[in-house]
C-alpha cells in the first residue's frame, strides 16, 4: 500500500516562507524512497516555489488546496486544474472541511471538482468527516456514506477503474481539526473501517489499494500511534506541518 504523509499549509506562508520550508523538506528527503509519498498542499501563490524545490525528488510532490471544475471562464477568484498543473501541482485537495463548513461547498460541487480534476490529470485527495453534532446524533455512517457516494455516483466508470495512484481519502473529523483534540484510536479505527467498506461498495476490491489518511490535530507525539492503526495509510497534517522540523518528525514516525 502506498502511504502518504501530507501537509496542508492552509492560508499560511508567503512565497519566501514557503521556499524556505520546501527547501528544508527537500534537503531532508532528497534520497528518501517514494513510499511514503510526502505531499505539501500549498497556497496557490506558493505552488511554483514548492514544486521547484521538490523537482526530481521521488518522495515529494506539491498539491493545491482547491480547484474549480472548468478549464477557464468567467469565474472570478477561482482557479482551474490546468492552471494548477501549470504552476507545478500534481495533487489537489477536494472537499476540505473548511471549504464545506466555512465556504459553504456542498456534496454536488465536491463531486464535480473531483471528477473534473481527475479528468485533467490531477490526483485528488478527497476529504470527508463529520461535525460534532452529526457524531453526537449518531450520524457518522450516514455522513461518510453521503460524502463518498455523492462523489462516486458522479464519477464515470472508466475513472473509477483508474483511481489507483491518483486518489486518496482523508478522514478528518471536523471536531478534531485545529482543536488539539485528536480522535481516539477507537474512533479512528471505526471511522477508517467504515470508509474502507464504503469505498469497497463504490469501487469493489480496488478500495483495498486506495490510501485512507487521518487528519485532525496530528502532532509528532501522536503520529506513530495513529500510523500503527488498521486502515490508516497516512496522515494529513495542518498546524504541525507549518514548521519543517515538526513535519519531518511526523514523516519519520
Ligand atoms: P490540524 O492538524 O491543524 O488540526 O488541521 C487538520 C487539517 O485540517 C488538515 O487538512
Image: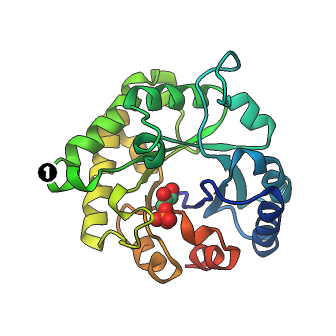
According to the image, label 1 marks what residue? 137
Instruction: Judge whether residue 234 can be spotted in this image.
Output: no
Q: In this view, does 6 lie above or below 80?
A: below
Identity of the residue drawn at 84% across and 59% down: 53
- Kindly indicate the quadrant of the structure image that contains residue 106: top left
Q: Is residue 32 above or below residue 101?
A: below
Q: Is residue 250 left or right of residue 52?
A: left
Judging depth in this view, the residue of 133 and 119 nearest the camera is 133
Q: Is residue 137 left or right of residue 69?
A: left
Q: Could you tell me residue 135's position as x and y percent?
A: 21, 54
Q: Could you tell me residue 122's position as x and y percent?
A: 65, 36
Q: In this view, does 81 lie above or below 200?
A: above
- Kindly indicate the quadrant of the structure image that contains residue 82: top right
Instruction: Determine whether the beta carbon of the residue marked 1 sits less than 8 angstroms from the nearest atom of ligand 1.
Output: no
Q: Is residue 140 above or below residue 231?
A: above
Judging depth in this view, the residue of 56 and 145 nearest the camera is 145
Identity of the residue drawn at 41% across and 78% down: 225
Q: Could you tell me residue 93's position as x and y percent?
A: 56, 44
Judging depth in this view, the residue of 218 and 115 nearest the camera is 218
User: Tag 1, which secondary structure?
Assistant: loop
Q: Is residue 146 left or right of residue 49?
A: left
Q: Could you tell me residue 107's position as x and y percent?
A: 38, 31
Identity of the residue drawn at 60% across and 31% down: 117
Task: List the single residue furthest toward the bottom.
Answer: 221
User: Are there few (<14), some (14-19), or many (20+) residues within 10 Å of tag 1?
Assistant: few
Q: Is residue 7 left or right of residue 55?
A: left
Amino acid at each position: 500500500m502506498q502511504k502518504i504523509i501530507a501537509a496542508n499549509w492552509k492560508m499560511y506562508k508567503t512565497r519566501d516562507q514557503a521556499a524556505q520550508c520546501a527547501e528544508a523538506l527537500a534537503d531532508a528527503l532528497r534520497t528518501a524512497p517514494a513510499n511514503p509519498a510526502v505531499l505539501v498542499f500549498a497556497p496557490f501563490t506558493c505552488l511554483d516555489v514548492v514544486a521547484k524545490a521538490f523537482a526530481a525528488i521521488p518522495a515529494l510532490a506539491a498539491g493545491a488546496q482547491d480547484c474549480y471544475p472548468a478549464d477557464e471562464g468567467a469565474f472570478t477568484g477561482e482557479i482551474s486544474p490546468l492552471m494548477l498543473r501549470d504552476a507545478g501541482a500534481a495533487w489537489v485537495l477536494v472537499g476540505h472541511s473548511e471549504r464545506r463548513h466555512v465556504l459553504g461547498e456542498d456534496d454536488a460541487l465536491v463531486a464535480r471538482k473531483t471528477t473534473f480534476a481527475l479528468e485533467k490529470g490531477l490526483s485528488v485527495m478527497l476529504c470527508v468527516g463529520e461535525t460534532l453534532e452529526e457524531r453526537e446524533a449518531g450520524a457518522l455512517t450516514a455522513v461518510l456514506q453521503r460524502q463518498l457516494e455523492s462523489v462516486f455516483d458522479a464519477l464515470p466508470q472508466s475513472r473509477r477503474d483508474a483511481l489507483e495512484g491518483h486518489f486518496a481519502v482523508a478522514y478528518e473529523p471536523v471536531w478534531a481539526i485545529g482543536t488539539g483534540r485528536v480522535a481516539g484510536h477507537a474512533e479512528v479505527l471505526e471511522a477508517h473501517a467504515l470508509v474502507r467498506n464504503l469505498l469497497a461498495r463504490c469501487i469493489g476490491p480496488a478500495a483495498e489499494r486506495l490510501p485512507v489518511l487521518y487528519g485532525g490535530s496530528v502532532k509528532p507525539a501522536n503520529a506513530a500511534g495513529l500510523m500503527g492503526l488498521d486502515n490508516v495509510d497516512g496522515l494529513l497534517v495542518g498546524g504541525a506541518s507549518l514548521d519543517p522540523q515538526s513535519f519531518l518528525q511526523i514523516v519519520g514516525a
